[in-house]
Image (tube, rainbow, N blue to C red):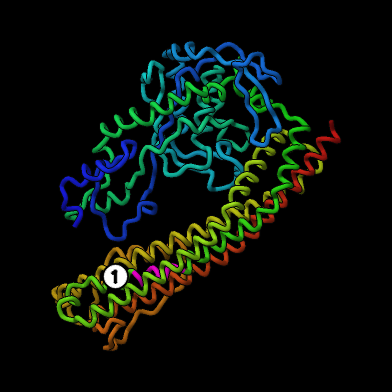
Amino acid sequence: MICQDEHLVENLNRVLPNHIRIWGYVETQRTFHAKTKCDSRVYEYLLPSYTLNAFERKEWTLEPSSDKDYMTRTEHGAVTKYIAPTDPQVLKAYRVDTPSFDKFKQAMELFQGTHNFHNYTIAKPFADPSCKRFMMDISVNEPMMIEGMEWISVKLHGQSFMLHQIRKMITMAMYSVRTNTPLSFLETTFDATKINIPKAPALGLLLDRPVFGLYNERIKDIPNRSCIDFSLYADAITQFKKQYIYKQIFAQEMAEQTLFLTCTFSFSLPLSLYINTHFFFIKMSTQSIDELVHAIANIAHVEQPCLENLLTIKKLEIAKEPIDKEYMDAVKKCGLQAEKDHAASGLKKATDLVAESTLKVQSEKDKIHEVEVQNEKYAIEYRTLQKYREDLDDLFNGMDALAGQIIMKSDLQELKDESTDLFEKIQILEKVKELIKEADMALLEAILELRASTAKEKSMGAGKVYFPETAFECLQEARRLYPDLPGFKSPTEYVKEQDNTGAYYSPMQKYLWDVRKRLGELITWCADEALVLLERETQVQVRLGQKTDEYNYERRRILKESS
């Protein structure tokens, strides 16, 4: 095995670029999947300490005051403004005072626990259950020096995060300090009132590590298995981040002043007043709204073909799953030592099955790749379309109270709720499918174990069947997650017959093979159910896009009539 190489890590790192490192490895269960077994994540946000200080007041202007001014514009070019930069040496020399640092730390700690984070993402109503997120731990480390500038590192450990959540949390805590706002105001952001919170730059955000807590808890008592523990390499990882990540963030900040430009407003009033009057956003103008509306109209036609192509890709991926299983089974049969020793013809048949399955898998991959290539242009324009709609919504903030929009807004919300509900059901089905696959793999491992030795089968006694605990737990959890999952009858009749390699199986082994067939039928059922929901979600997404554009056209009309 490759794991028998005691210098594996060193040998791999020797051929990798310096900015890509492997810290270590552990042997996992065959059913381990890094994505599904990860139950929480730790992110880090790095910000220069000067962002906690309100320097001299800076105003955006429509004309530059010098050739050193920074320029900002929306992606579509609707709004262009200029700002005079603060001397980089002033920013570099700043050192945060103890009261400001302590207040920032207290502000970040207020996010710990379970809260409704609807104000910390986009397009999510307060009533949406998915807005409730659990922050397990948030720590603000003491300021550190990077290339002569003071920086603050924030570590956020949560079960899951929403789009822009961390960046908006950082902004809220940062501006609470800059504007001398009471921390009690921060707690009101978890209430139903809609508050527009800007995003801190993506520059300082990085994934620190995934956490496999539940997996580690299950594995710790199993012989010859090790937990996945990144803390074993903490010193090396910290050194790597300082050398290759922190320095890159510092260099980009010095070159572009990304964080400075985002935090350039200097406030003298409490944060609550600025948020309620939308001082965080560029002043809304009819011209910029018109440009965005026209830009959206020019590319809105890509939405339906893009979403339909994504649906086609998903269908092809689902169609590929049984072929992947067929290939896996063929490989496992080919690898059985007993077949090698006692059934040369069976081994040849198994080898032929592997070759045949490999061709099938590649054929399905080619189909998926073909659609992905076709959809590439649509996907780029669709992302642009979504960005335009988001920008337009930002410009329209504050108009929701105007008459004539209530019904349209209600219709839009119904579509959003329907889309969210469908998405959550699809996610549950995907989780159920993964659990059934894990149970299937556990049964396959059991069959291989029984074929390698008859001792366990003989020890079971007459009328009893060995059924892996992992498979039982997975199927039990799948049933809990999706109560409508069909049941299946347990195989009761043993028929002595050859499989497709000419091999025979004992009654217990045959029983487990038959259970696997029924699990395969359950996986197909889940896939079919998911496809029905996916088709409905695609239709809802298309309607949602159309309704969103209609809603924005109406808001533009009302704005022009009231101006």
Q: Which residues are magenta?
A: 320-327
563 versus 519 height, above or below: above
Query: Which amino acid lies under the numbered mark 1 shown in the image of this protein?
Result: Val
521 sits left or right of 232 in the view = right
Of residues 4 and 558, the one drawn nearer to the viewer in this rendering: 4
176 sits left or right of 365 in the view = right
Of residues 296 and 15, the one drawn nearer to the viewer in this rendering: 15
159 sits left or right of 83 in the view = left
Of residues 360 and 114, the one drawn nearer to the viewer in this rendering: 360
Q: Specify few, some or many for label 1: CA neighbours under 10 Å numbering under 14, 14-19, or 20 or more.
A: some
The total number of labels drawn is 1
Residue 455: image location, x then y, percent: 13, 74
Residue hosting label 1: 331
Tell me, yes or no, whether the highlighted magenta stretch contains residue 153: no
* Displayed quadrant of residue 74: top right
Residue 510: image location, x then y, percent: 28, 80
Q: Secondary structure at mark 1?
A: helix
Residue at image point 64% right, 58% down: 305
98 versus 226 height, above or below: above
* Displayed quadrant of residue 534: bottom right
